[in-house]
Image (cartoon, rainbow, N blue to C red):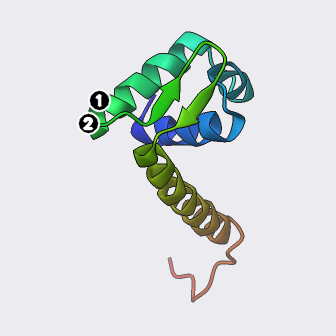
Amino acid sequence: MDHLDRIRLFVRVVERRSFTSAASDLGLPRSTATEAMKGLETHLGTRLLDRTTRHVAPTLDGESYYRRCITILADLDEAEGALRGAEPRGTLRH
């Protein structure tokens, strides 16, 4: 799982408030989701999520990171959508 995939997973975990639901939405085993979030937290050097057996919620750092991530992912989706729908322009030369 690359860094962007871990970010998408993090956003889904926050939105669903559940590792199990987020993993299911993305077609991943729960254990993969858990390990990916541990890896993201290690990479960032901070705890993003408070976990209990029944509840998952973002920490203060996690909430801040979540807000930035949804903006970044929306920008990325918009950029990719613009390219997919773009008509070729210019003169074709061979």
Res 16 → quadrant: top right
- Element under disc 1: helix
Task: Decide: few, some or many residues near mark 1? Use Cα within 10 Å; few <14, some 14-19, many ≥20.
Answer: few
Instruction: Tally the numbered discs.
Output: 2
Residue type at mark 2 is Gly
Please say if 15 is above or below 27.
below
Query: How far, Cα to Cα, is label 2 from label 1?
Result: 5 Å
* x 58%, y 34%: residue: 57
Could you say where residue 49 lies in the image, as x and y percent from the top left? Answer: 48, 32
Res 45 label? 2
The quarter of the picture where residue 44 lies is top left
Q: Which residue is drawn at 48% across and 35% down?
A: 6
User: Quadrant location of residue 92?
Assistant: bottom right
Say if 69 sits above or below 11 in the image: below
Dot 2, crowdedness within 10 Å: few (<14), some or many (≥20)? Answer: few
Percent across and percent down for residue 54 are 66, 17
Name the secondary structure under disc 2: loop
Q: Residue furthest bottom?
A: 90
Depth order, front residue of 90/78? 78
Q: Which residue is drawn at 52% across and 22% down?
A: 51
Where residue 41 appears, x then y in whole percent?
A: 35, 32
Amino acid, disc 1? Thr
The numbered mark at residue 42 is 1
In the displayed structure, would residue 58 be above or below residue 34? below
Query: Which label number is shown at residue 77?
Result: none
Q: Position of residue 4 (x, y in %)?
A: 46, 43
The residue nearer to you, when weighing 57 against 11, is 57
Which residue occupies the foreground of this view, 38 or 25?
A: 38
86 on left or right of 41: right
Q: Are marks 2 and 1 in contact (CB under 8 Å)?
A: yes
